[in-house]
Image (cartoon, grey):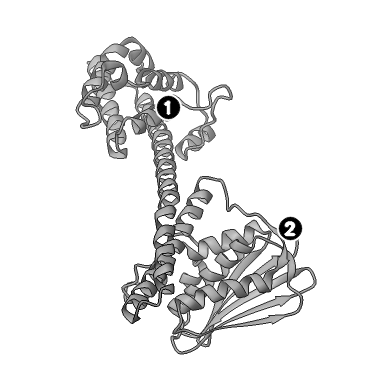
Amino acid sequence: MRLADFILRDMETILAQWETFAGTLLPAAANMQSLALRNHAQQILEAVAKDLSTSQTRDAQFEKSIGQTPKLAEAPQTAAQTHALLRARGGFDINQLAAEYRALRASVLRLWLDECQPDAPHLDDIIRFNEAIDQAITESVGFFSAHVEQARNLLLGMLGHDMRSPLQTILMTASYLAALNAGDKVSDAASRLIRSGAQMQALLDDMVDFNRTRLGLGIKIAPIEGDLAKQLADGLDLVRAVHPDHGVDLDVIGDCHGVWDGRRMQQLLGNLVLNAIKYGAPDVPVRVTVTGQESEVRLEVRNSGAAIDRSTLDRIFDPLQRGPHHLERNDDSSLGLGLYIVRAIAEAHGGGIEARSDETETVFVVRLPRRQ
């Protein structure tokens, strides 16, 4: 008997074994009824049987092997993808999802080989069946991973948003204490709170922005007419207040008027300068130059210190990347998102950023069109 015919004929026996195995995947399956345990298994098997019964060219076989099987226009999701989505919502992990397919593969082949005795099985059916199961696994794992990542990003986004209010209360209270002039001890404690709160605020801002980009929403900007040099100078005053022991110089050349989101530009410059302070030479000021050109404004941030190697420089704007020496510095004050956010802000304004580094200095160059 051909495998496709066997699957359709003995569907209930196969589904019963699927259900039995799925019931062992605890704790997610603990309170599931039969229908939930069998979740789309019949549709997956019917799709496999249909695939086995369809002639296949070498090109089609190759496309299937790399996960490029064409999808039906009227079916936005395959049965394997829907199965993965429901398993993710049901609390299964990705290892349990893959285990279901391993058990299904073994179960079907064992039952069919027993049915074929004493005749030899069709080897082409075994090859085609394994291809179809592999394709279902690829679809399921891809959909499962995307759903889990989206849920995680939503959770982190909501967490970052909800943490802002209590953090603002802490910062306002610390500023009030600093203004009381109640003695050196109170002033020093208030200053430490303000510095720590500013670091937490920067981390939360980066996390929220990162999640927006991962969810496909992009960096939100509200550009208005303004003088970029003045906006950046105001932002640098805040950085200097948090890092009073490190010099930050600003030079402005030419006219820097244009259309920008001032708060985002301050965030962009703040991330670049904080990165320069963290990894640059402690006794050499960070130099910021803003140059107004004919159609754009050029922003440069320079710091002295150890050169960044080429492999690190090539991926320096990728998310979750941190400097090569952060472990030596015992640095836990960064999520490795600062430069990723900088690039996203620049691109949201229609601009771009590049970096270069040698034994003399490290330079980040941002180019921003005056109008988008």
Three-letter amino acid code of the residue under disc 1: Thr
Which of these two is toward me, 164 or 25? 164
Which quarter of the rendering shows the C terminus?
bottom right
9 lies above or below 215: above
As measured in the structure, the alpha-carbon distance from the residue carrying label 1 to the one carrying label 2 is 41 Å
How many residues crowd around disc 1 within 10 Å: few (fewer than 14), some, or many (20 or more)?
A: some
The residue tagged 1 is 82
Which of these two is toward me, 342 or 114? 342
Single out the mark in the foreground, 1 or 2: 2
Residue 370 found in image quarter: bottom right
Residue depicted at 48% across the width and 34% down the height: 64
> Please, which residue is most extreme toward the bottom here?
283
Residue 74 found in image quarter: top right
Residue depicted at 68% across the width and 59% down the height: 350
Q: Position of residue 98 (x, y in %)?
A: 31, 35
Q: Position of residue 150 (x, y in %)?
A: 44, 42
Residue depicted at 48% across the width and 53% down the height: 208
How many residues crowd around disc 2 within 10 Å: few (fewer than 14), some, or many (20 or more)?
A: few
Q: Is mark 1 on a helix, strand or loop?
A: helix
Residue depicted at 25% across the width and 29% down the height: 103
Which of these two is toward me, 132 or 158? 158
In the displayed structure, does residue 93 sit left or right of residue 211? Answer: left
Q: What element carries label 2?
A: loop
In the displayed structure, does residue 356 sit left or right of residue 261? Answer: left
The residue tagged 2 is 372
- Dot 1 or dot 2: first in sequence order is 1
Three-letter amino acid code of the residue under disc 2: Gln
- Visible residue check, residue 10: yes
Q: Position of residue 326 (x, y in %)?
A: 36, 72
In the displayed structure, does residue 287 sit left or right of residue 191? Answer: right
